[in-house]
Amino acid sequence: MSKKTWFITGASRGMGVDFAKAALAAGHAVVASGRESDVVSKAVGQSNDLLAVTLDVTRRGDAEAAVRAAVDRFGRIDVLVNNAASFYAGYFEELTPEQIERQLATSLIGSMNVTRAFLPVMRKQRSGHIISISSAAGLVGFEFCTAYVASKFGLEGWMESLHAEVAPFGITTTIVNPGFFRTELLTEKSTNYAEPSIEDYDERRAKQLEFWKAQNGQQTGDPAKLARALFMIGSEEPPPRRFIAGADAIALAEQKVADLKAQIDAYRDLSTSLALDLEPGARAM
């Protein structure tokens, strides 16, 4: 396997640290980024093949500076992993507009900012692989997760559309849909809950809070195994357009497919009856 240069966002804690460590262990060069580069260095460890850079994905200037630093150090970027994300949980009516904007700014617009900064380098190389970490919540909507789900659905639509735009330049894309992995996402440091404000949600809110807080530290997925899987698919030519990670994520995806099929079939006759009624010999414009 040839040595590649990987750029990983959100590498100060959580899954990003595992991704960076796995890439270094596999013999690759890594540019690991986070809001504080010294925190990234401490989390990932020391290596001659590691460059830790400061990057707030919501700041376009940070992304552009990170690209320059990466290219100056390693000469090229082969794989970009859009991993940085946040988690704002709560009922839509109780989430503030500012919370929803912060969710989208990090988990959707942030990935766009970083990718926009890297695309000129990859186009010049006529090669590159963009991996965006989505979620099972990028496939299925969940109560109490409207902001997070919106960011992941948006990420997926953007990535699917981006694929067609950059494929002619030799650039590939992969969406990763992890299920529940034992990361820091559900810790108090990483999860932001809406303030209770509407009595009608009290009973369900209490159950949702109990569920989500109980999941922390109980997730069945191993992030180190996911990191190794990421490098397996990253070495394939071509890599998969989508990788659904975890048995729980596969079950949700299969249920989504079945639900879509049932909804199509339930109204197939009505849906297919909506064409214009044309006179014989006439053509639709």
Image: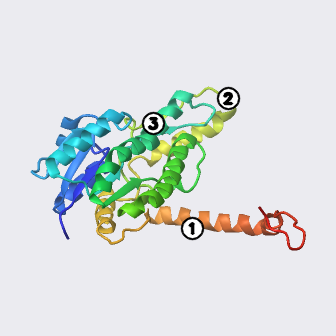
Q: Quadrant of residue 238?
A: bottom left
Quadrant into which the N terminus falls: bottom left
The local crowd at label 3, few if under 14, some if 14 to 19, many if 20 or more residues have their Cα within 10 Å, is many
Label 3 amino acid?
Ala
According to the picture, the residue beneath numbered tag 3 turns out to be 105
What kind of element bears circle 3?
Answer: helix
Name the residue: 83% across, 65% down: 270
Label 2 amino acid?
Glu
| Front label number (1 vs 3) | 3
What kind of element bears circle 2?
Answer: helix
What kind of element bears circle 1?
Answer: helix
How far apart marks 2 and 1 lie (CA) works out to: 35 Å
Residue 167 percent coordinates (x, y): 41, 62
Contact (CB < 8 A) between labels 1 and 3?
no
Q: Nearer the viewer, residue 55 or 39?
A: 55
Residue 90 percent coordinates (x, y): 56, 37
Residue 3 percent coordinates (x, y): 18, 63
According to the picture, the residue beneath numbered tag 2 turns out to be 199
Residue 176 percent coordinates (x, y): 42, 59
Q: Nearer the viewer, residue 151 or 218?
A: 151
Name the residue: 77% across, 61% down: 285
Q: Is residue 86 left or right of residue 49?
A: right
Tell me how the rendering is colored: rainbow
Q: Is residue 67 above or below residue 179?
A: above
